[in-house]
Amino acid sequence: SRCPPWEGDAFVGERQNARAGRVRTVRGLGMTETTPIPVLGVNFEGGKHVAEAASSPSCVAAYNCQVSMDAPFEEGQAAPEHLRQLGRTEQRLGVLDSQLQEQLRPVFAEAASKASAAGAWIVVQITRGRSAHAFFLAVVEPLLAELKAIPRCDVRTGYRSADHSLALSEPFVFITVGMFGRLTPGVSPGVVHAVETTFVVDDASTPAEPRRAVCLQHATHDEALKLLPPCRMISLPDHFPFVTPEEYVRDRLIGIASAGSV
């Protein structure tokens, strides 16, 4: 399907909005109020896995929740390997667990209600690496307990494609919670988004010269878009490294989402 363009002038316009201080607050988390187009982020999963889950005949509903996290090209906002080894990045960036829970609660409440009505399992995929278990215990498990959904919940972790096998014959509701690197200026860490468009990077390209392989639109199958602010995501191949200025060029990543990138 055809993807809406990420035009250079719109990106500049969003930067100007941020500099002008046009910011609204989501319980202490800053977001640009005037945004010509949705936030642009980068990670591995994007919306690929929610699209796969929603395509299953056993899937009752699917929700993709992506949290704005590090900003790889902004001073003091990056999360290189030596910092990720120290614990959850969001804590270092000042994001509170309660802030994340408040934003995720409507998603989990609706998912639990649909699962209960259909007699379905809730499959929760925490798309993180070493911090997945700690994040689940601190943020997600209390929500599930609050909704009395733990007995019918299947929790999984991992952000690579191999971590997302959903060969389920029983009815299920799918929720994925992931993190993304911020490419749009003026977006604070800790804001939970739904992905409306995924720009999938070609496996045969390189971090230095990434190319777009396909564009996925999620409006027809991601229920989170009705509950969370939208974003667009650049989805990296599994074998690519984490995004750092040493491995990637910011403008080339942003170019993946441009009108002429194919």
Image: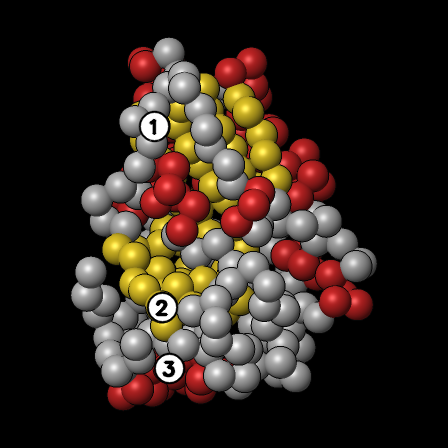
Q: Earlier in the sequence, mark 3 or mark 1?
A: 1
Place of residue 91 in the rendered image (x, y in percent of width and height, measured from the top left): 68, 55
Q: Alpha carbon of mark 1 to alpha carbon of mark 2: how far?
A: 26 Å
Badges 3 and 1: C-beta atoms under 8 Å apart? Answer: no
Residue under pointer 1: 59
Q: Amino acid at mark 1?
A: Cys
- The residue lying at 52 percent from left, 59 percent from top is 44
Q: Earlier in the sequence, mark 3 or mark 2?
A: 2
Place of residue 219 in the rendered image (x, y in percent of width and height, measured from the top left): 23, 49
Q: Nearer the viewer, residue 175 or 160?
A: 160
Question: What mark, if any, has residue 81 been given in the picture?
Answer: none
Q: Amino acid at mark 2?
A: Ala
* Quarter the N terminus occupies: bottom left
Quadrant for residue 113, please give it.
top left
Q: Nearer the viewer, residue 14 or 29?
A: 14
Callout in the foreground (1, 2) = 2
Task: Say left or right for 197 vs 245.
Answer: left
Task: Kindly state the secondary structure of the residue where label 1 is placed.
Answer: strand
Badges 1 and 2: C-beta atoms under 8 Å apart? Answer: no
Categorize mark 2 by other alpha carbons within 10 Å: few (<14), some (14-19), many (20+). some
Q: Alpha carbon of mark 3 to alpha carbon of mark 2: how far?
A: 13 Å
Q: Alpha carbon of mark 3 to alpha carbon of mark 1: how far?
A: 34 Å
Place of residue 237 in the rendered image (x, y in percent of width and height, measured from the top left): 51, 63
Task: Kindly state the secondary structure of the residue where label 2 is placed.
Answer: strand
- The residue lying at 52 percent from left, 41 percent from top is 164
Residue under pointer 3: 255
Residue under pointer 2: 213
